[in-house]
Image (cartoon, rainbow, N blue to C red):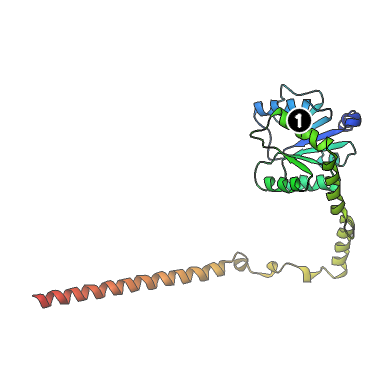
């Protein structure tokens, strides 16, 4: 109820959702104040998932939450933009609901994910290490006021929704398929039929280890034989000289 009241209070300007994912609990105090200053300069209301100390520059239009129902908020008709770290789950949720993005990727697959969204015209990318208050404000205003970002996000959403049946219908079909076919054993992963040592490839590792040890043994024996032959020849040469 608290979230809904705050969202509805945004009027025609709508809301912006901001989260850097579950792995980033907070940022430095200086960075948090800079981000809060940028968010305070936009007309939209902002729901920011943040667990750090409350920034001193936090605007009246911004509220901080330990957790937010991200997918539900992205699907709200008043949502105008999504500020994200570029995680796969968040990107697919934004695509599903047709919400343009401001990406602040940090590690893993996040930079690559956001590059794809930028290439498709549905996102703007910022660098957290060099971001300024003006950069954040301008990026948000760009994806909201430039209609091409919303149009491109809706185009991706349309493609995402274009499927022969809904996800719910597909799930029901495969459950019923499994029941009709007595557990659908033909779809069972064959890895379940392996012994524990086969599953962990211990038999393969044992084979390769045996080959390696055999090669080492042959190499040592060969070197020993050659060394022995050399010593014998030297001994014969010395006797002849005497």
Q: Nearer the viewer, residue 141 or 174?
A: 141
The residue wearing badge 1 is 137
- Side of 240 relative to 60 (left or right): left
* Rendering coords of residue 199 (x, y %): 63, 66
For residue 97, above or below residue 34: below
Q: Nearer the viewer, residue 223 or 148?
A: 148
Write the residue at 77% across / 44% down: 90
For residue 162, above or below residue 224: above
Write the residue at 77% across / 48% down: 120
Q: Nearer the viewer, residue 30 or 135?
A: 135
Residue sitting at the far left? 242
Q: For the residue carrying disc 1, how many other residues have a C-alpha within 10 Å: few (<14), some (14-19), or many (20+)?
A: some
Quadrant holding the N terminus: top right
* Rendering coords of residue 169 (x, y %): 90, 58
The count of marks equals: 1
Can you tell which quarter of the image residue 66 is in? top right
* Rendering coords of residue 72 (x, y %): 85, 41
Quadrant holding the C terminus: bottom left
Whether residue 8 is visible, yes or no, is no
* Rendering coords of residue 217 (x, y %): 39, 71
- Side of 237 relative to 219 (left or right): left
Write the residue at 67% across / 37% down: 127
Whether residue 4 is visible, yes or no, is yes
User: Helix or strand or loop: what does disc 1 sit on?
Assistant: helix
Write the residue at 87% across / 60% down: 170
């Amino acid at each position: 109820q608290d979230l809904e009241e705050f969202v509805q209070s945004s009027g025609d300007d709508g809301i912006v959702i901001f989260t850097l994912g579950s792995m980033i609990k907070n940022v430095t105090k200086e960075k948090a104040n800079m981000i809060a200053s940028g968010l305070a300069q936009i007309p939209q209301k902002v729901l920011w998932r943040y667990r750090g100390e409350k920034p001193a520059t936090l605007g009246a239009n911004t509220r901080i939450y330990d957790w937010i129902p991200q997918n539900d908020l992205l699907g709200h008709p008043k949502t105008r933009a999504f500020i994200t770290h570029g995680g796969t789950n968040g990107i697919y949720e934004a695509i599903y609901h047709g919400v343009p993005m401001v990406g602040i990727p940090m590690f893993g697959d996040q930079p690559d994910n956001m590059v794809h969204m930028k290439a498709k015209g549905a996102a703007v990318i910022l660098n957290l290490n060099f971001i300024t208050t003006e950069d954040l404000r301008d990026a948000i205003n760009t994806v909201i006021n430039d209609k091409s970002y919303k149009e491109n996000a809706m185009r991706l959403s349309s493609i995402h929704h274009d499927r022969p049946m809904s996800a719910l219908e597909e799930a029901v079909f495969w459950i019923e398929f499994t029941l009709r076919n007595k557990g659908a054993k033909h779809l069972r992963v064959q890895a379940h039929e392996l012994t524990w040592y086969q599953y962990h490839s211990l038999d393969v590792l044992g084979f390769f280890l045996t080959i390696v040890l055999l090669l080492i043994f042959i190499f040592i024996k060969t070197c020993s034989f050659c060394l022995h032959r050399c010593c014998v020849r030297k001994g014969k040469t010395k006797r002849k000289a005497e």
